[in-house]
Amino acid sequence: TRQEPSTKKVIGVKSGFIARAMSDRHWVEERIVLQDEEICFHHMERSKIHFHISLSNIIGLSIPDNENTPHLPSFYYLQIETFGRVTYLMFRSKEERDSWMETIHGLMKEEHPSSRSFTNHLIEVDDPMHEFLHKSNMWDCQKRRILNCRTYSFRTRRTMSPQETLEIAEQALIKVMSLQPKGPNDSDLIEFLDYAAALKDADAYSLNEEERFAFFLNVYHIFIMHAYIVLSPPDSSLKWMSYFTTIAYQCSDDIFSLAELEHNVIRSEMSYPSQFLSRFILPKSHYLFSLARADFRINFALNPGSLSMPTSSVPLYKAETLNEQLERVTRKFVRSAVSVKEKGSRDVTLVLPRVCQWFCEDFGPNGSTSDVLVAIEPYMSEEKRRALQMIWNTKKKSYEIGLFNLKFLHYNFECRFLTLEGDHSSNIADD
């Protein structure tokens, strides 16, 4: 016989016992207490609060469809929607579920008006980390917190085809980029967050190398914009490191932080930054779906929104046009950020972006400045290429390091929102 939990009194408008979904595959029994301004979830035997939902943050209260609940027909379900997540509750009886739904509805009407704006919501959220980030017990999260966790998938879904996997990333990128220019509203934000949650079911393993390349570049920029919109961008190097190693995405039956996505998935066959501490701070994770080839152009394609990037605009990467897109992005970056100035017959001053110093080993076998110049010279303007010929050693087939002054641009860790090249809004599939 099941032993009933303690009935130790917890003061509130209403209290009872429910099960709450902690992940796609795990539920936990808790004491639920409805207060005047929030719903609290306590340990069954103690008063410690595990989780809470402010009534002012609730945007929806409903009974989920059968397809969106576990296959346990003897229980009854309720879902509570906020912008950051959908909280799923399991009740023993229909009467108990309906009673809670009616009581919460009543308090919600008293707590806030029926219409609210996206901008006001973000201002009202006291703790965005609590609202939008989730520590899943499905994974060994350590310090990572999952961002694309608004909804759960309780039933085993069919495997996404390569085309579906590519399309869900493309649609999510189009949607997140469309939030900024026109002033996003509630439905736009929720639709994007649901697209981001759908990436959990993507199947990167089914993609070929070109498709995987385009997919993860798009996911990187989705991830960046998702984090910046709901948590705001980092504004210093110290915040940058914590930010990029803590915030994570669940995708293709695994999880990765922004740092892991960049260095262990996209740049998995490339060098770590040259800074000494980076080799100890950056993660060393391994993913079976990581890219299998190195390409120095990745250094110019990954755009975290830093003010040091020549542009805030990124392409919608596609496998069939990937090489042309990487060529265009690299040419645009190099022509904007590389400076070559002549001061005499053999006196040249060269200014390079900081990524060419941090990831110099990506550009050639020796990781030298000459290797960097050999790699990026084809992307320079004719005028700059002519200036470089003054310091080219034909016999050694390298640039004479001692014949030019070298400087690297300062890297600005302050970030801005990204934009999408062209107008792709009409490409979003109709629901």
Image: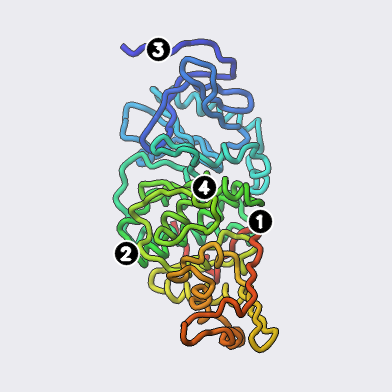
Give the SS element for disc 3: loop
Which quadrant would residue 121 be assigned to in this image? Answer: top right
- Front residue of 319 and 338: 338
Residue highlighted by disc 3: 4
Give the Cα distance between marks 1 and 2. 35 Å
Give the Cα distance between marks 1 and 4. 20 Å
Tell me the amino acid under the disc marked 4: Ile
Is 140 positioned to the left or the right of 307 in the image?
A: left
Above or below, 410 relative to 377? above
Give the Cα distance between marks 2 and 3. 54 Å
Location of residue 354 in the rendering, given as x and y in whole percent from the top left corner: 59, 65
Specify which label sits upstream in the sequence, 4 or 2. 2
Q: Residue 195 carries which label?
A: none
Residue highlighted by disc 2: 208
Above or below, 75 relative to 162? above
Above or below, 375 relative to 12? below
Which residue is rendered at x = 48% and y = 10% of the image? 7
